Image: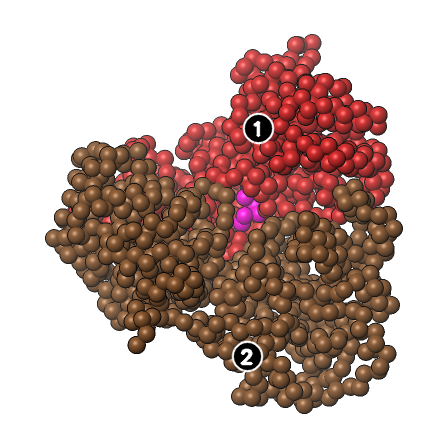
Chain colours: A red, B brown
Amino acid sequence: MSTQAQVRTRVRTSVATVSLSGSLEEKLTAIADAGFDGFEVFEPDFVSSPLSPGELATRAGDLGLRIDLYQPFRDLDSTDDEQFARNLIRAERKFDIMAQLGCDTILVCSSPLPTAVRDDDRLAAQLHELSVRADRRGIRIAYEALAWGAHVNTYRHAWDIVARADHPALGTCLDSFHILSRGDDPSGIRDIPGDKIFFLQLADAPRLSMDVLSWSRHHRNFPGQGNFDLATFGAHVQASGYTGPWSLEVFNDVFRHSATGRTAADAHRSLLHLQEEVARVQESECDTRGLSLFAPPAPAPIDGVVSLRLAAGPRKDGELREMLRHIGFHLVGRHRQHDLQLWRHGSLTIAVDATAGTVWTAPGIPADLPALTQIGVRCADPDAWGRRAAALEMPVSEVDLPGADPAQSDVVRLRVTDATSLDLRSPSSGAGWLSAFEMYPIPVAQWRRQRALFTGVDHIALALPADSWDGVMLALRSVLGMQPHEGLDVTDAVGLMHTQALTLGDGDARLRILLNMVDGNAFGMENIPVARRGGVSHVAFSCEDIFTTATHMVAGGYEPLPISPNYYADLEARFGLHPELLDRMRTLGILYDANADGEFFHLFTRTVGADLFFEVVQRVGGYKGYGEPNAAVRLSAQLR
Amino acid sequence: MSTQAQVRTRVRTSVATVSLSGSLEEKLTAIADAGFDGFEVFEPDFVSSPLSPGELATRAGDLGLRIDLYQPFRDLDSTDDEQFARNLIRAERKFDIMAQLGCDTILVCSSPLPTAVRDDDRLAAQLHELSVRADRRGIRIAYEALAWGAHVNTYRHAWDIVARADHPALGTCLDSFHILSRGDDPSGIRDIPGDKIFFLQLADAPRLSMDVLSWSRHHRNFPGQGNFDLATFGAHVQASGYTGPWSLEVFNDVFRHSATGRTAADAHRSLLHLQEEVARVQESECDTRGLSLFAPPAPAPIDGVVSLRLAAGPRKDGELREMLRHIGFHLVGRHRQHDLQLWRHGSLTIAVDATAGTVWTAPGIPADLPALTQIGVRCADPDAWGRRAAALEMPVSEVDLPGADPAQSDVVRLRVTDATSLDLRSPSSGAGWLSAFEMYPIPVAQWRRQRALFTGVDHIALALPADSWDGVMLALRSVLGMQPHEGLDVTDAVGLMHTQALTLGDGDARLRILLNMVDGNAFGMENIPVARRGGVSHVAFSCEDIFTTATHMVAGGYEPLPISPNYYADLEARFGLHPELLDRMRTLGILYDANADGEFFHLFTRTVGADLFFEVVQRVGGYKGYGEPNAAVRLSAQLR
């Protein structure tokens, strides 16, 4: 038996009911369905529920769920002795409920009130008194520092008070948000005896500049959805010897109204993802104490995007075909049974689906057609990806490309968003389903012309409603191992859009995805262009010389976007570009950006339908951006 | 001629193009239509516009608009002399454009960069050099301190640099956001010579805890929509002798996608409102320098809410009538031509409209029926209200109550939200239109029973989509002179709702309105109860003894909401209420809140249709709230 196997333990998973939407009954069902071992009762959920404590305990038992924590108990300590006495009575009433619930741990958080006790000995004495009463009832007190506590607001201080109070029924509760939001160094967690950590609450959060209280109450999310280094945090906790549940406590405005089951599934996936990340940190530290049992197959190498599928429907089919022809794609085949065409450009394939059918960007929100429904990626080992996705509880869809034999196809399909899936194919796959197509011979002249144009797919932008954002982010980061870069707000004539790039590894060009979130208020608003309501989706092709490429495209029928002359005057003022270069750019509708890393030239097509367009980009030097400052200029030209 | 008349001046109004959504052409049309005298060209709007500078100048001239300012010119000063030389060339390119625009003032803002000049003399010298160049072109430099400037970030410092640079083409620009967001004392504005203030930018903002840059770029709004004391600020500016335009520069995520014309109208109204507020401050200071010419009729006294109109449509009519009967209203008449019933309870009248027709909560968003479409308020002088509303450019609607003669009706109707209007009626009005109704005799027993119940309308809650929020807030504050109280986020099982109370004067009970904003993302989401998608609207009746009232209601058929027993256990733990009182409350579905001001008892009906319900409240002592902590408990019971 290896040393590693000896110490590996199964992590018990838990989640606070406040993290999900719905009634308490709905939450419990979703928590059990998602595979959690237990949950925290968030008191306001219990207070408004018709379930009595006994009924709740029975329901939890029937679902195989432990009630891990009752929370929060606020404002225990007080400089006013009478108030403290009343608080002890209030606590006894909660112990009554916990006895009926069969829950043995209550969260007591540090007080943010002006009456908070600021004398550590007196505070420890008050906590000791509460612990004596709790102990009589068989209940444990988990004392937590709120980041905005009046006196106690760091985990070190909370642990110091617990040590000072010195009662077996008293321990501390660690909450990653309260610790990391303050920028505290979490390494001191290693110094706390694991058996005195009575509970562990985990939350991630995006980097935001706002007061910690608002940040905490509205913008927490699950591990792998935000910007905290939870992997290192988790490694510290494992090193302490803590063996209790890993529990999610997330206050998030979007989750509060999102589909309960979907959020619960994301929550559980986030804990699996975190375990893998923690194990990675532990391995890098050669620390094998408490290594998690969870070890999915590692991500296999990906070569890059080789194919796309676009749903055009019968109404947008003509417009899309014209656009594809103009930018240099050629119709090479047609399905024998279905209204499905194959277009090629060099080694890139686009399948255009002209059959009728609705594509959904989210439950209840139909996408505007044409919509990008599949991204085909070539990789060495699709099967390993399939096993990895399954381990991370990500549904692997059936392959429904007409003509394909699912058992033989060697294609793994991951649903990345409601509208778009990612197909992972081995280099050998694809030959089988081609037989379902009638293929056309291609004139040599066309092959020649193509050589000058696109070298691949630079990036793909996907439109996302706010409700889907965190779930998609987690899927891309956990299953595919993609890395998020700095998010950005882009403004234009019709609103503000948050955009976020993800790449394989640090800027790896083989797969770059931009997520575009539109303000949910735009849905149903009359004066918003349809493109903005449904978000903005596009495919950007890379090329080696954008001027040559654009000239060829114009020869093929592409009409450059009418970019404002004011834009080129501003480029001249800002970058001092040569007037002759600016003239060529203006003629071909080419936009420009530059920074310390390099330069970026790009052009856009008009939109096809309301929502889809194509981009062509040329990167010079190490430019890593996406020309975001040009978004308003691009949209203004597309709207004309 | 009085002294006051001698110094009153007409304020010139202006607005930055960034404050509105749409293309630059659409913005200009909306700005002219709203009655502005001029506008600021926000450079990114110009850069993405197809209009050449000459075409823009012509368009502005045709619309009767002055181009008051070109902005912003960023990062002029630099510790790197070569960079500063390049910045001067960049400025010259902008002067070229301004010459074609016919615009003579450019905004230069303090630098937030690490290369910002931190030596005041050197900074003044660089600004002097720019001013010499500008002067040659007939252009003026308005230098502004950004709140997040690296070295210059207060208006006093910016003015000091301007004084030090000492050039006739150089003055300062004041921006209320940059000054008030930092908590700076604006009274020093009085010490700046008015002719050295080259420009005035105004923005209000809600009180938010976030970094000033994000607050500024996303959450500014128009005067009368936020929490800044702009009246005092404006009085300081008037006292300085400034005679230039009062211009709005607002960066607001919601306005960026809202209807352009509506936002522009709100913008202009906000400047009229501000002038009235400034004049009020000046009068209180006996300061008659520069008093504005704008003086609408003052708000006339309001007695209170006396009637409501509810649109039920043919489908919700029966359900609503049953509810009205259960809570103690009686059918007293029916319209002779239309399907319109009159219901009475004491002196309160409710008209129920069962005719078919859609009520819109916002353009494109149909309200769920039944919906509250009119609030009837009794006041001494409706005509004065009508003239006041007209002066503040608030549309006064036609009165369409069947049977009413608009010329005679003595009713002024203000559209408060898209769904709901406020009817201001004199005590004598109403007799005319009653003749169109067939009235029923009422049994004496009914009259008796009614005496014990409602004493009036305590408050009315209106559901608002985020897009309408600021406009409605401004209308209530400007025309009706209502005062906003602290806003509050309320969470429950289906999401988070921002709620905001407004009252006449400070807590005046004669008219209390709660605005409820729902997260726009909820629209179109499948798993959100309809009630939450369309917002939450209700009418709260006041009473003197809620236990007697509720007992009478139960006798009339009202079924108390099934409030969770856990709620009463929690009330006992929190407030130590007597078990017998808790028992009576539980039986009647009565909820409770208390604070230092007093106590609050209230009960709710189930919802009628998806969105409307009634509340009964009893206030004890000086309790000023609305029982907000009980929202989740109420909704949980209504959903069952």
Q: Chain of mark 2?
A: B
Q: Position of residue A8 (x, y in %)?
A: 67, 17
The quadrant the N terminus of chain A occupies is top right
Along the viewing direction, whichever of A636 and B459 lies nearer the viewer: B459
* Structural crowding at the residue carrying mark 2, measured as other residues with C-alpha within 10 Å and reported as few (<14), some (14–19) or many (≥20): some
Q: Is residue B518 left or right of residue A305?
A: right
In the image, is residue A467 part of the stretch drawn in magenta? yes
Within the image, what quadrant is residue A153 found in?
top right
- Farthest residue in the bottom direction? B435
Cα separation between marks 2 and 1: 60 Å
Q: Where residue B6 appears, x then y in whole percent?
A: 29, 71
> Would you identify the image quadrant in which residue A384 lies?
top right
Residue at (53%, 53%) from the top-left corner?
A520
- At horizontal 32% and vertical 46% (from top left) the residue drawn is B155
Give the overall secondary structure of the magenta segment: helix
Residue of label 1: A179
Of badges 2 and 1, nearer the viewer stands 2
Horizontal side, residue B505 vs residue B585: left or right: left
Query: Badge 1 sits on which subunit?
Result: A
Circle count: 2
What's the residue at 68%, 48% (across, down)? B596
Same subunit, labels 2 and 1: the answer reads: no
Q: Which span is picked out in magenta?
A: A465-472
Q: Is residue A122 left or right of residue B184?
A: right
Q: Amino acid at mark 1?
A: Ile
Task: Tell me the number on the disc at residue B381.
Answer: 2
User: What's the residue type where badge 2 is placed?
Assistant: Asp
